[in-house]
Amino acid sequence: MLASLAEGSGGRLTRHERQRRIGAIEGGGTKFVCVVDDTDSGIAARAVIPTRDPAATLGDCLGFFRDATARLGPLQALGIACFGPLQLRRDAADFGHLLPTPKPGWSGVDVLGPFEDALRVPAVVDTDVGCAALGEWRRGAGRGLGSLAYVTVGTGIGGAVVPGGGARLMHAEMGHLPVRRDPRDQGFAGVCPFHGDCLEGLANGPAVRARWGRDLADLPPDHVAREIIAGYVAQLVAAIALLHSPEAVVIGGGVTTGGDLLPLVRHATHALLRDYLPPLARPEQVAAFVRAPGLGADSAITGALQLAREAIDAQR
């Protein structure tokens, strides 16, 4: 599933492209995925590293790249897609560091500097959901569209819209929007350590397990949890449609794996919008608007590879 550099190029690579060997990291709440992409062979090396404390996790990632470059040769650039919130302002003293995050022990951690220092190549960082949006827009479900939003519903909830541009306070933190409570879900306080019952606090994977004792995929198909979670996610989809008006919203993440939640999200989104937006007035229009990832679980790592390619191009 993971797209290598050669894909989408029509098989014709320039001399500059033929020389590319790039690395990428997708840092998530449960695992870090590390890859090396070589133009000649596609994905030449890959490892999945469980997310533990920062020193152990980042140390294992560095070990992977040291071993891979010793076998394959040096990298030209590295793209990092990491859970957030992240400091992405280049003029900030803590650029590339995690800001206060619900992930215990990770607030303030530098996720960029150790790789720049050890690998001595251009390294670029963005949020995991920002990279997922980029990957799906360039090579996945949004290929050929002028704009796209990506939403992930997993250990955390986040969203991003591409293309971006212009000065921003920071990256979007869509998962922490307040939402209207489902009448069937009044007794649960929420799991977000900052807001309690924001969208992430009510609808991420840990919230599902705290409330119903199992992952959503392990609950019966007709369990009320599915409608409740779909309704919360639909509130975010409707907000994205009203605020940003992208051509599509792609929904990924562990909670939505398998695709059985998407029909419920589409139905709830249509009900929320109430035919107000003409391009989304009919159920079949909403069905085309709310999409599954075209790259499966590789949306973010594909976007991180794209960041690395663009870092090389910026130096030409």
Image (cartoon, rainbow, N blue to C red):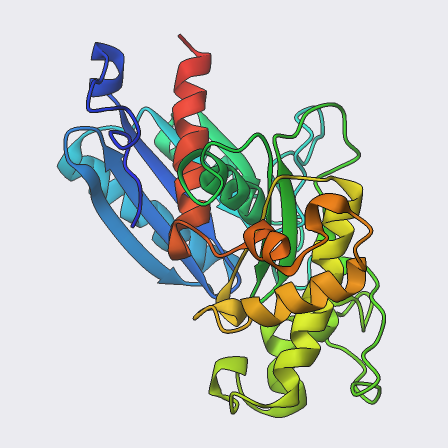
Report whether 221 appears left or right of 122: right
Vertically, is 180 above or below 250? below
Q: In the depicted view, which residue is nearer to us: 292 or 95?
A: 292
Identity of the residue furthest to the top in this view: 316
Instruction: State the image quarter where residue 223 is shown.
Output: bottom right
Above or below for 291 versus 155: above
**Residue 221 image point, x, y percent:** 52, 87
Q: Is residue 166 left or right of residue 18?
A: right
Direction from residue 40 to residue 63 in the image, left or right: right
Residue at the (70%, 68%) spot, across then down: 268
Q: Is residue 83 visible?
A: no
State which quadrant residue 13 falls in.
Answer: top left
Instruction: Say which quarter of the image contains residue 86.
Output: top right
Label tally: 0
Query: What is the x, y in percent for residue 188?
Result: 79, 86
Please state if 295 lies on the left or on the right of 166 as rendered.
left
Residue 234 placement (x, y as % from top left): 70, 63
For the point 39% across and 56% down, the residue is: 296
Q: Is residue 136 visible?
A: yes
Where the C terminus falls, by quadrant? top left
Q: Which residue is pictured at 52% across the width and 68% down the height?
A: 256
Q: Residue at x 56, y 38 (%)?
A: 126
Residue 58, image x and y in percent? 44, 51
Image height of 198 relative to 78, above or below: below
